[in-house]
Image (cartoon, grey):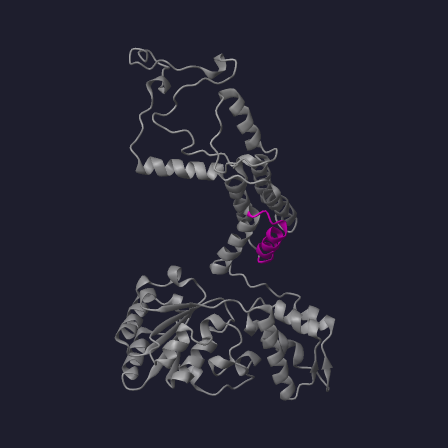
Amino acid sequence: MSDLFDSGPPMGHTPLAATLRPQTLDDVIGQSAVVGPNTILRRRIAARALGSVILYGPPGVGKTTIARAVGAMLGKEFCQLHATRATVAELRKLADAARIKPMLIFVDEVHRFSSTQADDLLSICENGTADFIGATTGNPYHTLTPALVSRSVILQLEPMTLEEMEQVVRRGLAHLRATGADITMSDAQIRLVAGRSGGDARRALTTLESLALGHEGGAVTITEDMMEEAYAAAAVNHDRSGDQHYDIVSAFVKSMRGSDPDATLYWLARLIHAGEDPRYIARRIMIHASEDVGLADNSALQTAVAAATAVEKIGYPEARIILSHAALHVARAPKSNSACRGISLALSAVTSEPVKTVPKHLRDAHYKGAQALGHVGYQFPHADPRGWVQQDYAPDLARGKFYQSDARDGGTFEKRADTYWEQVTGTPTPRIFSKP
């Protein structure tokens, strides 16, 4: 059901992205996993049993387009609502109307629904009064109520590939030429518009329209100066509070862990370009200096801590160099997960196993009467020429239960420590990886 401002015909210019909106799923570029042959969506349409569907993905990948195409294919009245404007009364009025005529209700930004709105929507979905499609840029499992998620088919849309984006731009260019705009663009320029749009078809078509329209005279050849002007202040898609933020951060830290310096720098650049707080980035680097490098190179944590201190004092733009320095140290350092793995195993044991009693020889003996209580027998390692003595430090604790060395070939601290202690104790160090 449309509101006053949606009901009338458009009074001004219709954006190119709206003009070229596909009318059927066959016209949709990309998203083959969602709209292709024999997909869940296609089968539900064929069975005329759409039910409740959540389309989840970043802006400009076709959520609204797919919803409209589904409505047309089902032959149902398409009623579009926006979660921030739809009222409970309007939802209930829609439910009444849907009992009389076939209807597809589409809710944009469904994650912004209040609990009351969500309850009314659920009643419509549960009863099968109308088909429902919700669109959200946030992960439904995080942003929607469990009740709505459990009643819906969740379909994830991905950013379009570069090749798919080129198809979008060429389709837009063909439409402009067919409607009288004599525009010349090189293949390289088309590819640049496609690539700089971050998988967002709407952004690509908006940029193309900005380049093509408003010129006086006849034929227009797009120049490099015009391209630079169009992208002078263009942002890269990055929602600092949503899924994309966490996905890019995840790619950044996994690239450091995977020892890929080029990927590390790319994802770091994406974070910096999006205006991510350098202190946040530095904190992530500090964590992974211990989690992923750890005992293989203790200086990685020193570098990361120094970087965190430095960016507090410096800030952008120079902070980018310091963050790069620290991130590359983590990426290029040899890796050991023994510190992270060891404390995780120990904490798990503390919470799931019987509590161990502190051995008497390890208990505090710095007071009168401790000896009478039997707090005796501790052997001072520094009194031994080796700096080590054999004694129990925790009862019934198997060696290697928590700490297993990640030392591999190479002169890492952990490797040197293994060699040293094997010579002192005469016993091999427990290793997570053992040579055949």
Q: Residue at x 65, y 85 (%)?
A: 177
Magenta stretch: includes residue 350? no
Q: Looking at the rendering, in which quadrant would you find the N terminus? A: bottom left
Quick one: 426 or 75, which is closer to the camera?
A: 426
Quick one: 349 or 431, which is closer to the camera?
A: 431
Q: Position of residue 241 (x, y in %)?
A: 48, 58
Q: Would you say residue 82 is visible in this rendering?
A: no
Q: Position of residue 251 (x, y in %)?
A: 53, 54
Is residue 183 toward the left or the right of residue 161 in the image? right
Quick one: 250 or 109, which is closer to the camera?
A: 250
Q: Position of residue 76 (x, y in %)?
A: 37, 84
Q: Quadrant of residue 80?
A: bottom left
Q: Does residue 317 sit above or below 188 in this rendering?
A: above
Q: How many marks?
A: 0
Q: Does residue 295 sit above or below 50 in this rendering?
A: above
Q: Residue at x 62, y 78 (%)?
A: 170
Magenta stretch: includes residue 259? yes
Q: Residue most toward the front? A: 436
Question: Which residues are the magenta region?
Answer: 258-274
